[in-house]
């Protein structure tokens, strides 16, 4: 069952602006790159398991 909350685009934009700096900082860090690469490897493995 889908719930339509009619959230205005401006609210999504505001939320994205709040999260973006933290996300950028994480993915630019050594730890973030390492975790992303581990996740990416799992995704590639999962794709070949089908």
Image (tube, rainbow, N blue to C red):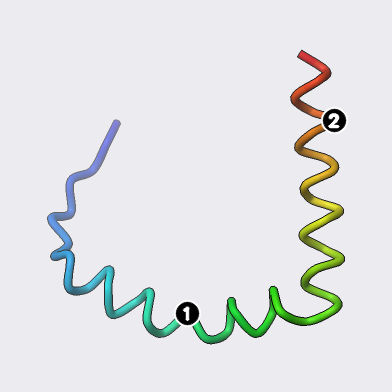
User: Label 1 near label 2: C-beta < 8 Å?
Assistant: no
Which residue is farthest front? 28
Residue 36 image position (x, y, % from top left) = 77, 60
Residue 25 image position (x, y, % from top left) = 65, 85
Mark 2 / mark 1, whichever is N-terminal: 1
Q: Nearer the viewer, residue 14 or 4?
A: 14
Q: In which quadrant is the N terminus drawn? A: top left
Q: Nearer the viewer, residue 45 or 2?
A: 45
Q: Quadrant of the rendered structure where residue 24 is?
A: bottom right
Residue 43 image position (x, y, % from top left) = 76, 37
- Tag on residue 43? none
Left-right relation of 39 to 9: right
Could you tell me which residue is drawn at 83 percent across and 40 percent down? 42
Left-right relation of 20 to 24: left
Tag 2: Cα neighbours inside 10 Å, few (<14), some, or many (≥20)? few
Query: Spatial distance from mark 2 to mark 1, Cα to Cα?
Result: 29 Å
Q: In which quadrant is the C terminus drawn? A: top right
Please tell me whether mark 2 sits on a helix, a strand or a loop: helix
Tag 1: Cα neighbours inside 10 Å, few (<14), some, or many (≥20)? few
- Tag on residue 19? 1
Residue 30 image position (x, y, % from top left) = 85, 78
Could you tell me which residue is drawn at 59 percent across and 77 percent down? 23
Vertical side of 47 occupied by 7: above or below: below
- Tag on residue 45? 2
Please tell me whether mark 1 sits on a helix, a strand or a loop: helix
Could you tell me which residue is drawn at 13 percent across and 65 percent down? 8
Could you tell me which residue is drawn at 27 percent across and 68 percent down? 12
Left-right relation of 2 to 27: left
């Amino acid at each position: 069952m889908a719930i339509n909350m009619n959230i205005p685009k401006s609210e999504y934009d505001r939320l994205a602006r709040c999260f973006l700096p933290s996300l950028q900082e994480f993915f630019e860090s050594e730890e973030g790159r390492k975790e992303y690469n581990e996740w990416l490897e799992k995704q590639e493995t999962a794709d070949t398991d089908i």
